[in-house]
Amino acid sequence: MRRFLVPGLVGVLVLILAGCGGGSGTDLTVFEQLSDQAVDAHISAVIDPGTGEPTIFPATATGSVRVGVDGAGIEYRGFLDFPITAIPATADVRLAYIEVFVGSVPFGAAVPVLVELVDFQPPVLIGSDFFRTAPAPFLPPVLARPIFDFFPSDAVPPRPAVRIEVTTLVQRALQRLQPDFQLRLLLDPAVPGPGIVQLDDGAAATAPLLHVEYL
């Protein structure tokens, strides 16, 4: 469905009849949503002298989201935001994944990434979101999916979309009544680096996309 997305598209709801292909007879709804570039960003461990907190690099300025540790030992953590208010809180989510396009994997080795469900409502990032490993009592606990590997081949033309399964994370976001499905991506804490991946976050054709199938 990605090839039909156009700039400015907020989301797509498509009804699939399970009768096509011998389904159980239950209708399945497919929801697709581009990430909100106005919220997406990566945060560097380098302290911004103006705020006294880690430095934020908005995707609206960079057109990308960086995840990992560079050759100088500086860590970057990426944040993606997908509005999900069109999905009922009671939805029975059967499958969910995000698709991303890899711009570069500069060190030529696999980059193991931890993908975490976070909630930085209202949906405006602040530098301290970089450290959200031990949330304050008023914040929901962090939930993560298993480590996901990005490979140098992911950045080689024609650069097919990389799919990351996030079913349990979407289910939990709906249980929490989060209006936005928000992810933090960081290098596997067990890996000292360097290891970094840069994801596209500009034109709609290669922007991060959330796909959810539910009853």
Image: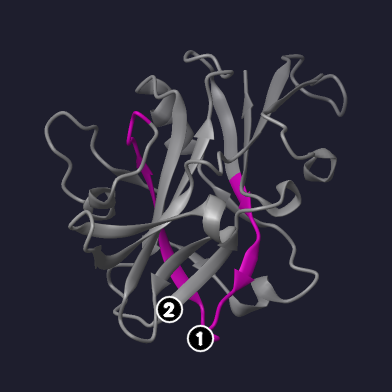
Identity of the residue drawn at 72% across and 76% down: 156
Choose between 64 and 208: the one closer to the eye: 64
Pick whichever of labels 2 and 1 is earlier in the sequence.
1
Instruction: Return the x and y of residue 14 as percentages of the image width and height.
Output: 77, 23
**Residue 65 pos. (x, y %):** 51, 59
Left or right of residue 7, residue 120 in this image = left
Residue range corresponding to the magenta coloring: 98-122
Q: Is residue 57 above or below residue 17?
A: below
Colour mapping used in the image: one colour
- Above-or-below relation of 163 to 71: above
Q: On the image, which quarter does residue 71 sit in?
A: bottom left
Query: Residue placed at 59% from the left, 58% from the top?
Result: 63
In the picture, the quarter occupied by the C terminus is top right
Does dot 2 land on a helix, a strand or a loop? strand
User: Which sits in the foreground, 94 or 158?
Assistant: 158
Q: Position of residue 62 (x, y in %)?
A: 54, 60
Q: Farthest front residue?
A: 50
Q: Report the residue at 26% width, 60% height from top.
A: 54
Question: Of the numbered discs in the image, which one, if any, rests on residue 107?
Answer: 1
Which numbered dot is residue 195? 2
Mark 1 is surrounded, within 10 Å at the Cα level, by few (under 14), some (14 to 19) or many (20 or more) other residues, namely some
Amino acid residing under circle 2:
Gly
Tell me which amino acid carries mark 1: Phe
**Circles 2 and 1: CB distance less than 8 Å?**
yes
Q: Is residue 125 among the parts visible in the rendering?
A: yes
Identify the residue shown where x is 61% and y is 79%.
152
2 left or right of 98? right
Residue 7 drawn in magenta: no
